[in-house]
Amino acid sequence: MTGAASSISIPKGDGVKVPSTGTPMIEVSELRKFYGDFEALKGISFTVGKGEIVGFLGPNGAGKTTTMKILTGFISATSGRFAVAGHDGFQESLELRRAIGYLPENAPMYPDMGIVEYLEFIAEIRKIPSSKRRARIFKMVELVGLGPMIKKNIGELSKGYRQRVGLAQAMIHEPPVLILDEPTSGLDPNQIVEIRRLIKDLGREHTIILSTHNLPEVQATCSRMIIISGGRKVADGTADQLEREGRQSSRFVLNARLPTGGEPYHVRTQLGALPGVTSAEEAGQADGAHRFTISTSGSETELTEAIFSLAVREGWALRELRRDVVDLEQIFHRLTQY
């Protein structure tokens, strides 16, 4: 789901060109990366539109950080194509980097530097004209809420405030695209809420891709998610879209007390033989009742009627028959098993 396009203020002469509305801000096509014989990325393709906050989601080792490092120019891709803000990743690497603000998982900072001193250092590296630096620095300080800590050295800050400094350095040159790698890693619950709120606010004026393995992080912050696993893209859509796709194959839960001599294996076989059933599995026993899970690609109404008829004929005492709700956590688990 693409958010509404918003105007982005880019000072003239800063070397950043923003594509017109409707042009993807991030384009990735068949991106591959080998480390020796190991293929970390296996042909990933996706686009991110202007104004989107997209969660780049996957388990540890899925290839998230490798993708982020390629997009930001830290490492090279083996093959494929990528572009950011209209700049080709192979042909216009310098222009591409100017268009990106990057917050790595462990942002390198100098603990003995004060906040303002550090941001002045970053502004100089980013070639921001000296006449504009002071105003830009204090705009960032206000934007990320560093005011109360302005006189402290970075080494004196909590992890949450250091993340705010990291966001300030990522945005100081006012790039149209922000790439954030695990931005709430290691924060306490209150700090996580604050950083998530800040990211959502930043999304009003930036295109953001947020890399994480934390599903609640994406649900709370992002309008869309891309899930990768084993170096491949396995899903791309909004939370609602992924949940709808996950429900295309329905699953039911059956709890029943079996008659004397009734065997769970026999019940499982009978359930598996019903029309439309793709699988039937025993899922445990409690209080004298047996639990089964039944997957079907057929009519839910016909299946429930068939199960009731079978239960009456076989003398099962039904305690529960319900449709199993598939949530995003289950979908993520199913997609990322490899």
Image: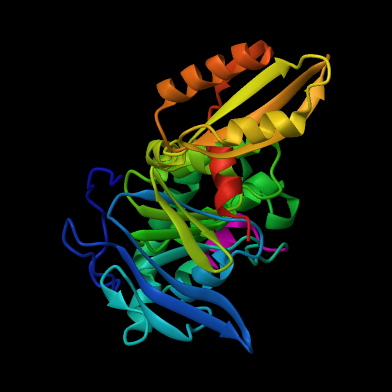
Q: Which quarter of the rendered picture does the C terminus lie within?
A: bottom right
Number of numbered callouts drawn: 0
The residue depicted at 52 percent of the width and 72 percent of the height is 69
Q: Work out whether 311 lies above or below 156.
A: above
Which image quarter: residue 46? Answer: bottom left
**x and y percent of residue 283 in the render?**
73, 32
The residue depicted at 38 percent of the width and 82 percent of the height is 93
**x and y percent of residue 153 in the render?**
69, 55
**x and y percent of residue 135 in the render?**
39, 55
Q: Which quarter of the rendered picture does the N terminus lie within?
A: top left
Q: Look at the image and say whether residue 41 sits in the magenta stretch.
A: no
Q: Look at the image and say whether residue 113 sits in the magenta stretch.
A: yes
Which image quarter: residue 310? Answer: top right
Which image quarter: residue 62? Answer: bottom right
Q: Work out whether 312 lies above or below 29.
A: above
Q: Work out whether 261 lies above or below 234.
A: above
- Asked whether the viewer can see residue 238, the reply is yes
- Asked whether the viewer can see residue 147, the reply is no
Q: Work out whether 269 lies above or below 228.
A: above
Q: Main secondary structure of the magenta part?
A: helix
Residue 334 as seen in the image, left or right of residue 79: right
The residue depicted at 71 percent of the width and 25 percent of the height is 291
Residue 34 as seen in the image, left or right of residue 79: right
Which segment did they paint magenta?
A: 112-121
The residue depicted at 80 percent of the width and 24 percent of the height is 285
Residue 265 as seen in the image, left or right of residue 162: right
Closer to the camera in the image, 298 or 148: 298
Q: What colour scheme has been applied to the protein in the rendered image?
A: rainbow
Closer to the camera in the image, 3 or 195: 3
**x and y percent of residue 242 in the render?**
43, 42
